[in-house]
Amino acid sequence: MKIYQDIKKFGDVNFAVVTVGTFDGLHLGHQKIIQRMNVQAKENKGETILVTFDPHPRLIVHDNSKDLKFINTKKRKFNLLEKLGIDHIIIVPFTKEFAKKSSEDFIREYLVELLEVKKLIVGYDHHFGNNREGNYDQLYLLGQKYGFEVEEIKAQYINDTAVSSTKIRNALMEGNVRKANEMLGYDYSITGIVVEGNKIGRSIGFPTANIEIEDKYKLIAAKGVYACKVDVDGKIYHGMGNIGTRPTIGINGLVTEVHIFDFDKEIYGEEITIFFVDRIRDEKKFKNLDSLKVQLLKDKQTVLPYLNQLT
Protein backbone atom coordinates (compact mmCIF):
# COMPACT_ATOMS: atom_id res chain seq x y z
CA MET A 1 0.00 0.00 0.00
CA LYS A 2 1.30 3.45 -0.95
CA ILE A 3 0.35 6.69 0.83
CA TYR A 4 0.44 10.04 -0.96
CA GLN A 5 0.41 13.41 0.80
CA ASP A 6 0.16 15.19 -2.57
CA ILE A 7 -2.40 13.96 -5.09
CA LYS A 8 -0.42 15.56 -7.93
CA LYS A 9 2.39 13.08 -7.29
CA PHE A 10 0.08 10.14 -7.95
CA GLY A 11 0.93 8.34 -11.17
CA ASP A 12 -1.26 6.63 -13.74
CA VAL A 13 -3.03 3.33 -13.12
CA ASN A 14 -4.77 1.10 -15.62
CA PHE A 15 -8.29 1.17 -14.13
CA ALA A 16 -8.81 3.43 -11.12
CA VAL A 17 -11.39 2.13 -8.65
CA VAL A 18 -11.95 4.98 -6.19
CA THR A 19 -13.76 5.74 -2.96
CA VAL A 20 -13.79 8.95 -0.93
CA GLY A 21 -14.32 9.54 2.79
CA THR A 22 -12.88 9.75 6.28
CA PHE A 23 -13.65 6.10 7.12
CA ASP A 24 -13.54 6.53 10.89
CA GLY A 25 -13.81 3.10 12.45
CA LEU A 26 -13.51 1.13 9.23
CA HIS A 27 -16.68 -0.70 10.25
CA LEU A 28 -18.55 -3.43 8.38
CA GLY A 29 -20.11 -0.91 5.98
CA HIS A 30 -16.70 0.51 5.07
CA GLN A 31 -15.30 -3.01 4.71
CA LYS A 32 -18.08 -3.89 2.27
CA ILE A 33 -17.11 -0.89 0.12
CA ILE A 34 -13.47 -1.95 0.08
CA GLN A 35 -14.31 -5.59 -0.64
CA ARG A 36 -16.34 -4.44 -3.65
CA MET A 37 -13.48 -2.19 -4.78
CA ASN A 38 -11.08 -5.13 -4.64
CA VAL A 39 -13.43 -7.24 -6.77
CA GLN A 40 -13.82 -4.50 -9.38
CA ALA A 41 -10.09 -3.82 -9.52
CA LYS A 42 -9.30 -7.51 -9.98
CA GLU A 43 -11.93 -7.95 -12.69
CA ASN A 44 -10.63 -4.94 -14.64
CA LYS A 45 -6.90 -5.41 -13.89
CA GLY A 46 -6.96 -2.10 -12.06
CA GLU A 47 -6.00 -0.67 -8.67
CA THR A 48 -7.91 0.64 -5.67
CA ILE A 49 -7.57 4.23 -4.46
CA LEU A 50 -8.97 5.64 -1.23
CA VAL A 51 -9.12 9.44 -1.07
CA THR A 52 -9.33 10.84 2.45
CA PHE A 53 -8.80 14.17 4.20
CA ASP A 54 -6.54 15.58 6.89
CA PRO A 55 -7.45 17.10 9.23
CA HIS A 56 -10.92 15.62 9.55
CA PRO A 57 -13.41 17.99 7.83
CA ARG A 58 -15.42 18.46 11.03
CA LEU A 59 -12.35 19.89 12.75
CA ILE A 60 -12.40 22.70 10.17
CA VAL A 61 -16.07 23.40 9.52
CA HIS A 62 -17.69 22.84 12.96
CA ASP A 63 -17.36 25.03 16.05
CA ASN A 64 -17.70 22.05 18.43
CA SER A 65 -14.70 20.24 16.97
CA LYS A 66 -12.96 20.20 20.38
CA ASP A 67 -15.45 17.50 21.43
CA LEU A 68 -14.82 15.38 18.34
CA LYS A 69 -13.26 11.98 19.01
CA PHE A 70 -12.32 9.22 16.59
CA ILE A 71 -12.70 5.46 16.90
CA ASN A 72 -9.27 4.79 15.40
CA THR A 73 -6.05 6.76 15.22
CA LYS A 74 -4.70 7.48 11.73
CA LYS A 75 -1.97 4.88 12.23
CA ARG A 76 -4.48 2.20 13.21
CA LYS A 77 -6.81 3.12 10.34
CA PHE A 78 -4.03 2.90 7.77
CA ASN A 79 -2.90 -0.46 9.16
CA LEU A 80 -6.43 -1.80 8.80
CA LEU A 81 -6.73 -0.42 5.26
CA GLU A 82 -3.54 -2.17 4.27
CA LYS A 83 -4.86 -5.47 5.65
CA LEU A 84 -8.10 -4.93 3.70
CA GLY A 85 -6.09 -4.68 0.48
CA ILE A 86 -6.25 -1.01 -0.52
CA ASP A 87 -3.50 -0.23 -3.04
CA HIS A 88 -3.26 3.55 -2.64
CA ILE A 89 -4.27 6.14 -0.04
CA ILE A 90 -4.32 9.79 -1.10
CA ILE A 91 -4.50 12.35 1.71
CA VAL A 92 -6.02 15.66 0.64
CA PRO A 93 -5.31 18.66 2.94
CA PHE A 94 -8.64 19.95 4.22
CA THR A 95 -8.76 23.71 4.67
CA LYS A 96 -11.50 26.32 4.96
CA GLU A 97 -10.85 27.26 1.35
CA PHE A 98 -11.07 23.64 0.23
CA ALA A 99 -14.36 23.27 2.16
CA LYS A 100 -15.93 25.90 -0.15
CA LYS A 101 -15.25 23.79 -3.22
CA SER A 102 -18.42 22.55 -4.91
CA SER A 103 -19.05 18.84 -5.22
CA GLU A 104 -18.73 18.97 -9.02
CA ASP A 105 -15.46 20.90 -8.88
CA PHE A 106 -14.03 18.34 -6.48
CA ILE A 107 -15.07 15.42 -8.69
CA ARG A 108 -13.79 17.05 -11.86
CA GLU A 109 -10.49 18.42 -10.53
CA TYR A 110 -9.45 15.57 -8.25
CA LEU A 111 -11.10 12.35 -9.36
CA VAL A 112 -11.51 12.90 -13.11
CA GLU A 113 -8.55 15.06 -14.12
CA LEU A 114 -5.94 13.81 -11.64
CA LEU A 115 -6.97 10.20 -10.95
CA GLU A 116 -8.86 9.40 -14.17
CA VAL A 117 -11.44 7.49 -12.17
CA LYS A 118 -13.17 4.64 -13.96
CA LYS A 119 -15.32 3.35 -11.10
CA LEU A 120 -16.42 5.26 -7.98
CA ILE A 121 -17.84 3.19 -5.11
CA VAL A 122 -19.53 4.93 -2.16
CA GLY A 123 -21.66 4.12 0.87
CA TYR A 124 -25.41 4.55 1.08
CA ASP A 125 -25.23 7.85 3.00
CA HIS A 126 -22.31 9.43 1.17
CA HIS A 127 -22.27 13.24 0.95
CA PHE A 128 -19.47 15.50 -0.19
CA GLY A 129 -18.61 19.01 -1.36
CA ASN A 130 -19.54 22.42 0.04
CA ASN A 131 -22.24 22.02 2.73
CA ARG A 132 -22.33 18.30 1.89
CA GLU A 133 -24.38 19.16 -1.19
CA GLY A 134 -23.24 16.16 -3.20
CA ASN A 135 -25.08 12.83 -2.95
CA TYR A 136 -25.47 9.62 -4.91
CA ASP A 137 -27.96 11.08 -7.41
CA GLN A 138 -25.56 13.89 -8.26
CA LEU A 139 -22.65 11.45 -8.45
CA TYR A 140 -24.59 9.35 -10.94
CA LEU A 141 -25.18 12.39 -13.17
CA LEU A 142 -21.55 13.46 -12.88
CA GLY A 143 -20.49 9.95 -13.81
CA GLN A 144 -22.49 10.17 -17.01
CA LYS A 145 -21.06 13.61 -17.72
CA TYR A 146 -17.40 12.73 -17.11
CA GLY A 147 -17.38 9.08 -18.13
CA PHE A 148 -17.10 6.99 -14.96
CA GLU A 149 -19.36 4.43 -13.30
CA VAL A 150 -20.86 4.93 -9.84
CA GLU A 151 -21.91 2.15 -7.48
CA GLU A 152 -23.64 2.61 -4.14
CA ILE A 153 -23.15 0.02 -1.39
CA LYS A 154 -26.25 -0.51 0.73
CA ALA A 155 -26.26 -0.20 4.51
CA GLN A 156 -24.96 -3.15 6.52
CA TYR A 157 -27.18 -4.27 9.41
CA ILE A 158 -26.47 -5.83 12.80
CA ASN A 159 -29.60 -6.91 14.70
CA ASP A 160 -31.78 -4.72 12.45
CA THR A 161 -29.59 -1.67 13.11
CA ALA A 162 -27.77 0.04 10.25
CA VAL A 163 -24.05 0.20 10.99
CA SER A 164 -22.55 3.69 11.25
CA SER A 165 -19.55 5.38 12.86
CA THR A 166 -21.89 7.54 14.96
CA LYS A 167 -23.64 4.50 16.43
CA ILE A 168 -20.29 2.88 17.19
CA ARG A 169 -19.05 6.01 18.97
CA ASN A 170 -22.26 6.14 21.01
CA ALA A 171 -21.95 2.46 21.96
CA LEU A 172 -18.35 2.99 23.12
CA MET A 173 -19.26 6.05 25.17
CA GLU A 174 -21.97 3.93 26.84
CA GLY A 175 -19.43 1.18 27.53
CA ASN A 176 -21.15 -1.28 25.21
CA VAL A 177 -17.98 -2.49 23.50
CA ARG A 178 -19.59 -5.79 22.51
CA LYS A 179 -22.12 -3.91 20.39
CA ALA A 180 -19.40 -1.64 19.00
CA ASN A 181 -17.23 -4.63 18.11
CA GLU A 182 -20.11 -6.32 16.30
CA MET A 183 -20.52 -3.25 14.08
CA LEU A 184 -16.77 -2.81 13.62
CA GLY A 185 -16.16 -6.44 12.73
CA TYR A 186 -13.11 -6.46 15.02
CA ASP A 187 -12.25 -5.43 18.58
CA TYR A 188 -12.05 -1.77 19.57
CA SER A 189 -8.55 -1.01 20.82
CA ILE A 190 -6.33 1.58 22.48
CA THR A 191 -2.59 1.80 21.80
CA GLY A 192 -0.15 3.62 24.05
CA ILE A 193 3.23 3.69 25.72
CA VAL A 194 3.54 1.94 29.10
CA VAL A 195 4.39 4.47 31.81
CA GLU A 196 5.13 4.12 35.50
CA GLY A 197 2.18 4.33 37.88
CA ASN A 198 1.98 4.32 41.66
CA LYS A 199 2.44 0.51 41.78
CA ILE A 200 -0.48 0.04 44.18
CA GLY A 201 -1.89 -2.72 41.95
CA ARG A 202 1.33 -4.65 42.36
CA SER A 203 1.01 -4.48 46.16
CA ILE A 204 -2.29 -6.40 46.04
CA GLY A 205 -1.25 -8.94 43.41
CA PHE A 206 -2.69 -7.15 40.39
CA PRO A 207 0.11 -5.19 38.71
CA THR A 208 -1.11 -3.09 35.82
CA ALA A 209 0.44 -1.57 32.73
CA ASN A 210 -0.67 2.07 32.61
CA ILE A 211 -0.59 3.51 29.10
CA GLU A 212 -0.11 7.03 27.87
CA ILE A 213 -2.21 7.86 24.81
CA GLU A 214 -0.63 10.47 22.55
CA ASP A 215 -3.53 11.13 20.16
CA LYS A 216 -5.81 13.70 21.83
CA TYR A 217 -8.64 12.87 19.41
CA LYS A 218 -8.72 9.16 20.25
CA LEU A 219 -12.13 8.09 21.59
CA ILE A 220 -11.79 6.42 24.99
CA ALA A 221 -14.63 4.07 25.93
CA ALA A 222 -16.73 4.56 29.07
CA LYS A 223 -15.28 4.05 32.52
CA GLY A 224 -15.38 0.49 33.79
CA VAL A 225 -13.67 -2.88 34.04
CA TYR A 226 -13.22 -4.84 30.81
CA ALA A 227 -12.24 -8.26 29.54
CA CYS A 228 -9.26 -7.59 27.27
CA LYS A 229 -6.67 -9.03 24.96
CA VAL A 230 -3.29 -7.34 24.93
CA ASP A 231 -0.68 -7.18 22.18
CA VAL A 232 2.83 -6.99 23.64
CA ASP A 233 5.58 -7.12 21.02
CA GLY A 234 3.37 -9.06 18.62
CA LYS A 235 2.22 -11.69 21.14
CA ILE A 236 -1.38 -11.73 22.37
CA TYR A 237 -2.14 -12.16 26.08
CA HIS A 238 -5.39 -12.19 28.03
CA GLY A 239 -6.04 -9.53 30.61
CA MET A 240 -8.39 -7.36 32.60
CA GLY A 241 -8.50 -3.65 31.82
CA ASN A 242 -9.76 -0.59 33.61
CA ILE A 243 -10.69 2.83 32.31
CA GLY A 244 -11.35 5.35 35.04
CA THR A 245 -10.09 7.44 37.92
CA ARG A 246 -9.40 4.60 40.40
CA PRO A 247 -11.64 6.09 43.12
CA THR A 248 -10.43 3.70 45.82
CA ILE A 249 -6.95 5.15 45.51
CA GLY A 250 -8.05 8.69 44.71
CA ILE A 251 -6.22 10.10 41.69
CA ASN A 252 -6.80 12.96 39.32
CA GLY A 253 -7.45 12.37 35.63
CA LEU A 254 -8.52 9.43 33.53
CA VAL A 255 -6.31 6.34 33.49
CA THR A 256 -6.26 3.44 31.03
CA GLU A 257 -4.56 0.37 32.48
CA VAL A 258 -4.51 -3.38 32.08
CA HIS A 259 -3.54 -6.34 34.27
CA ILE A 260 -2.03 -8.94 31.95
CA PHE A 261 -2.56 -12.54 33.05
CA ASP A 262 0.51 -14.80 33.42
CA PHE A 263 2.90 -11.98 32.59
CA ASP A 264 5.81 -10.63 34.63
CA LYS A 265 8.05 -8.72 32.19
CA GLU A 266 9.06 -5.09 32.64
CA ILE A 267 7.64 -3.19 29.67
CA TYR A 268 7.99 0.46 30.67
CA GLY A 269 8.52 2.57 27.58
CA GLU A 270 7.12 -0.06 25.23
CA GLU A 271 4.07 0.38 23.03
CA ILE A 272 1.21 -2.04 23.66
CA THR A 273 -2.31 -2.36 22.30
CA ILE A 274 -5.30 -3.22 24.49
CA PHE A 275 -8.25 -4.85 22.71
CA PHE A 276 -11.50 -4.41 24.64
CA VAL A 277 -13.70 -7.48 24.31
CA ASP A 278 -16.51 -6.82 26.80
CA ARG A 279 -17.35 -4.59 29.76
CA ILE A 280 -17.99 -6.57 32.95
CA ARG A 281 -18.84 -3.89 35.50
CA ASP A 282 -18.81 -0.22 36.46
CA GLU A 283 -15.82 1.33 38.15
CA LYS A 284 -16.60 1.79 41.85
CA LYS A 285 -15.02 2.91 45.08
CA PHE A 286 -14.14 0.32 47.74
CA LYS A 287 -13.59 1.01 51.44
CA ASN A 288 -9.98 -0.23 51.33
CA LEU A 289 -7.42 -2.09 49.20
CA ASP A 290 -8.35 -5.47 50.70
CA SER A 291 -11.93 -5.03 49.49
CA LEU A 292 -10.65 -3.99 46.08
CA LYS A 293 -8.48 -7.11 45.88
CA VAL A 294 -11.46 -9.35 46.73
CA GLN A 295 -13.43 -7.77 43.89
CA LEU A 296 -10.55 -8.06 41.44
CA LEU A 297 -10.28 -11.77 42.21
CA LYS A 298 -14.00 -12.10 41.41
CA ASP A 299 -13.51 -10.08 38.23
CA LYS A 300 -10.72 -12.39 37.12
CA GLN A 301 -12.94 -15.42 37.62
CA THR A 302 -15.56 -13.71 35.45
CA VAL A 303 -13.13 -12.71 32.72
CA LEU A 304 -10.99 -15.86 32.36
CA PRO A 305 -13.67 -18.33 31.17
CA TYR A 306 -15.06 -15.74 28.78
CA LEU A 307 -11.68 -15.01 27.18
CA ASN A 308 -10.76 -18.70 27.05
CA GLN A 309 -13.79 -19.31 24.84
CA LEU A 310 -12.30 -16.97 22.24
CA THR A 311 -9.11 -18.97 21.73
Image (tube, helix red, strand yellow):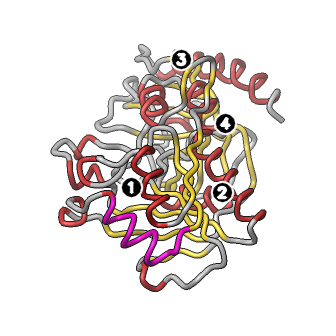
Task: State the residue at coordinates (45%, 45%).
Answer: 136
Mark 2 or mark 1: which is in front? 2
Q: Is residue 68 visible?
A: yes
Amino acid residing under circle 2: Met
Q: Earlier in the sequence, mark 3 or mark 4?
A: 4
What residue sits right under mark 1 in the picture?
A: 215
Q: Earlier in the sequence, mark 3 or mark 1?
A: 1
Q: Earlier in the sequence, mark 2 or mark 1?
A: 2
What residue sits right under mark 2 in the picture?
A: 37
Instruction: Give me the disc on residue 238.
Output: none
Q: Dot 3, how many residues are within 10 Å of its Cα: few (below 14), some (14-19), or many (20+)?
A: some
Q: Is residue 5 above or below residue 264?
A: below
What residue sits right under mark 3 in the picture?
A: 281
Magenta span: 104-117
Mark 4 or mark 1: which is in front? 1
Q: Earlier in the sequence, mark 3 or mark 2?
A: 2
Please tell me which residue lies in front, 301 or 83. 83
Task: State the residue at coordinates (69%, 51%).
Answer: 35
Q: Are marks 4 and 2 in contact (CB under 8 Å)?
A: no
Residue 237 x %, y %: 73, 44
Amino acid residing under circle 3: Arg
Residue 116 x %, y %: 52, 74
Q: Relative to 43, is 92 on the left or the right? A: left
